[in-house]
Amino acid sequence: MSPQSDPPARSVARSEFGSLTRLALPIIVTQLSQMGMGIADTIMAGHLGAEELAGVALGGNLFWPIMMVLSGTVMAVTPSVAQLNGAGRDAEVGEVVRQTFWLGVIGGLMGVLILGYAEHLFWWVGVDARAIPIAVGYLDVVRFGLLPVIGYFILRYLCEGMSWTTPAMVIALSALAIKVPLNVVFMYDGYGVDGMGAVGCGVASALIMGLEFIAMVLIVIFSRMRKVELFGRFSKPNFKEIARLTRLGAPIGATMFFEMAVFSAVALLVGRLGVEALAAHQIALNINGVTFMIPLALGIAATIRVGYNVGAGDYGRARIAGMVAIGSSALFAAAAAVVLLVGREFLAELFTTDHAVVAVAAKLLIFVAFYQFFDDGQAAAMGVLRGYKDTKVPLVVALIAYWAIALPFGAWLAFDPIGLGVYGFWWGFTAGLGVAAVVLTLRVFWLSRSEARIAAFALR
């Protein structure tokens, strides 16, 4: 228990709110910059024609889920490093990260191999034959950026685990600044390089992934991160440590994958309802994606602060940090809901001038407004639990929420005999994420109140 001389809870909460904010702001910019690069690819491929756009989209729909699984798996670095940092055991951080590199190499090589067989998968699924060679050409080059980008994520998570989120922001902003020029050079004719179309988009992306990794390596070597002596020596694979990291990180990667996959599945099903419904659905998703960056960043910041305080043995402060993150997420959801409700027609009109699409999208933004509370709440709670190294139960909760509730319930409501159309899927999202938010928040209360349970999870 905390001694009597400890500061009052209100003072600790204010301090933790300040720490969470300082950590989260650079993460928000980082995530938005990464979204910006994806938007740039979509717009610039679209200017080349529908087939090029379809090819980039098709290739991206295979590359990004694989990258998300791998980046989520190596995210085991963040809570592991945060707890070591809080315990004052920085000398052990380098070895943890070196073993994570072995995990990243194994997973990255498997990903590169899988992407090499993409053409067979596309033919088996039966996608439009015109887009297949373009998608395959795109993947043939972008897959060579997979290993470097996994290395970048590992080093990013190292810095974040050490409570330093600025480097990723600087690198992401720099990458966004050069993304469009590189796309122009490699995608279009001119500048001394023959235009390669969608393949050029893949070349630009792979180059940026490599540059991001190199930049992060330089930051680790020449900044305060050098104290962990990551590159001070070579470490052979320690399969016991790699297995521990996999047990911690694989559920994170799987959670991220299943979350992405359910939105892709719903988009395919909404496509059966007509182009207006699909367009409106996509507008609502895009707007929700932007607002989600705030609670996502709060969740990552919560992982860092909770992990640090657990490592320091201050379980009371860890609990307050978690509650502050969840509470801050709820406050943001309320503010976002007001903006979405008041400005829903204006926001929809930013994406299209089609009045039918605007009308549907504006109604969907009502769902998004209320859905915010659940989506934001579960994101913050998930981040808190990761700080405690609790990743398996959140995976099970996510699977049930998305695949046993949101998708089937939404489809049942959307199609006959209920026939709510696209609105049915958003009722499904709201129900599924509502269950996830409640269960994960209760899980935070359950875990954070027991020192024995916290200590047991910290050993993982």
Image (cartoon, helix red, strand yellow):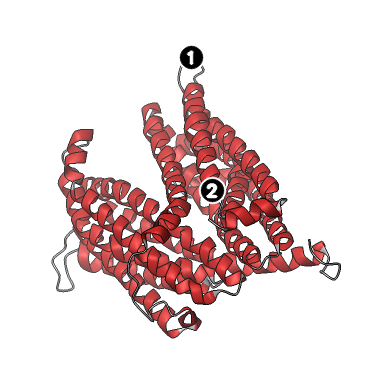
Q: Residue at (38%, 29%) from the top-left corner? A: 274
The reply, left or right, for residue 109 in relation to residue 84 is left
Which residue, as the protein is rendered here, is positioned at the far top? 417
Q: Amino acid at mark 1?
A: Pro
- Whether 57 is drawn above or below 146: the answer is above
Which residue has dot 1 on it?
Answer: 417
Q: Residue at (19%, 57%) from the top-left corner? A: 199
Which sits in the foreground, 431 or 148? 148
Q: Earlier in the sequence, mark 2 or mark 1?
A: 2
Instruction: Please provide percent x and percent y for residue 218.
Output: 38, 80
Q: Find numbered disc 1 in the image and state the secondary structure of the residue it sits on.
A: loop
Which sits in the foreground, 344 or 376? 376
Which sits in the foreground, 242 or 335? 242
The answer to which image quadrant residue 243 occupies is bottom left
Q: Find numbered disc 2 in the image and state the secondary structure of the residue it sits on.
A: helix
Q: Residue at (48%, 37%) from the top-left corner? A: 399
Which residue has dot 2 on it?
Answer: 347
Instruction: Please provide percent x and percent y for residue 228.
Output: 48, 78
The reply, left or right, for residue 222 in relation to residue 59 is right
